[in-house]
Image (cartoon, grey):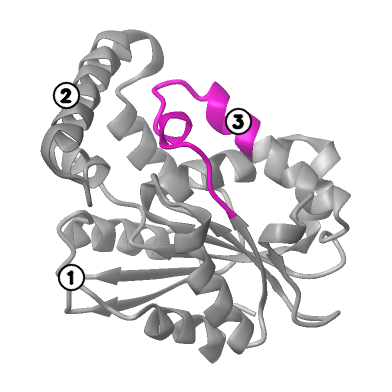
Amino acid sequence: MASSRLIICGPQSSLVVILGWAYAQDKHVKKYAELLRSLGYSSLRFTCPATDVMSVFERPRIAWAKGLLKELQSDHLAPHRKLIFYSFSNGGMLIYHQMIKLMQTDARFRGVQEAFCGSVFDSAPSYMHIFAGAEAFTAGMSGLQGLSVKLAYYMVVILAVLLSPLIGFQPVVFWNTCREMRTDKPELYLYSTDEPLCDHQKLESLIAYRTKQEHDVTRASWHRKVYACATQISVLARGSIK
């Protein structure tokens, strides 16, 4: 099932599960997988529709997360090798949240939980400022397409506000979930202080909070808006998570 998105480097190599950002396509995520291969890491690439990832309802994310966990077990990737979850931006983070919750509450995924050894968060989590969210959704778009997506985004925001008495205001719920995640595995945060879509001050506050809560946290930051993925991946290779 995963063969086209799976790269195996050796029988004992750790497997990095790459959770793509919203609107990421497999061809975008593949360059990270190739770099991981050069460093001796096996990988499995994951992307899904942005409308499901960013839905105000959890059901689509739960379904995708459950499917990925089943894939890891059915393809005998877990618990036979260590698993590292690599989340890009909030799109990857939202799927990661559901995977963690399922691993901790559903006995069917005990094998994945046993194999799970650490997490990498790349430009994540990003505090959901409303206008920054609109820019994130329309990154790379222009003209009518970008305008249409922005209008749709603001309609979803209005819907989220209207539903907030029932389901909570999603940006607040998301951020609190990131702060209070119950994991005892190492966490590596990678981010740029010059990235407009990721509020680094908010992120650094979250990292400080989780460190104070005695989570095993490492961070690496850059001062340039664009930083090479090879540099990001090399931090992982230096042994922050093995």
Q: Nearer the viewer, residue 211 or 74?
A: 74
Q: Which residue is mark 1?
A: 193
Depth check, mark 2 against mark 3: the one in front is: 2
Three-letter code for the amino acid on which mark 2 is drawn: Leu
* Quadrant of the frame with the C terminus: bottom right
Res 203 quadrant in image: bottom left
Disc 2/disc 3 C-alpha distance (Å): 26 Å
Label 2, residues with CA under 10 Å away: few <14, some 14-19, many ≥20: few
Q: Which residue is mark 3?
A: 62
Three-letter code for the amino acid on which mark 3 is drawn: Ile
Depth check, mark 1 against mark 2: the one in front is: 2
**Which secondary structure lies at badge 2?**
helix
Residue 63: horizontal and vertical position, in percent?
A: 64, 29
Residue, far front: 144
Q: Is residue 189 above or below residue 101?
A: below
Residue 22: horizontal and vertical position, in percent?
A: 39, 45
Q: Nearer the viewer, residue 186 or 44?
A: 44
Three-letter code for the amino acid on which mark 1 is drawn: Thr
Q: Which residue is mark 2?
A: 151
| Mark positioned earlier in the residue sequence (2 or 3) | 3
Residue 54: horizontal and vertical position, in percent?
A: 39, 33
Q: Is residue 240 visible?
A: no
**Which secondary structure lies at badge 1?**
loop
**Which secondary structure lies at badge 3?**
helix
The residue range painted magenta reads 46-64
The verdict on residue 62 being magenta is yes
Label 3, residues with CA under 10 Å away: few <14, some 14-19, many ≥20: many
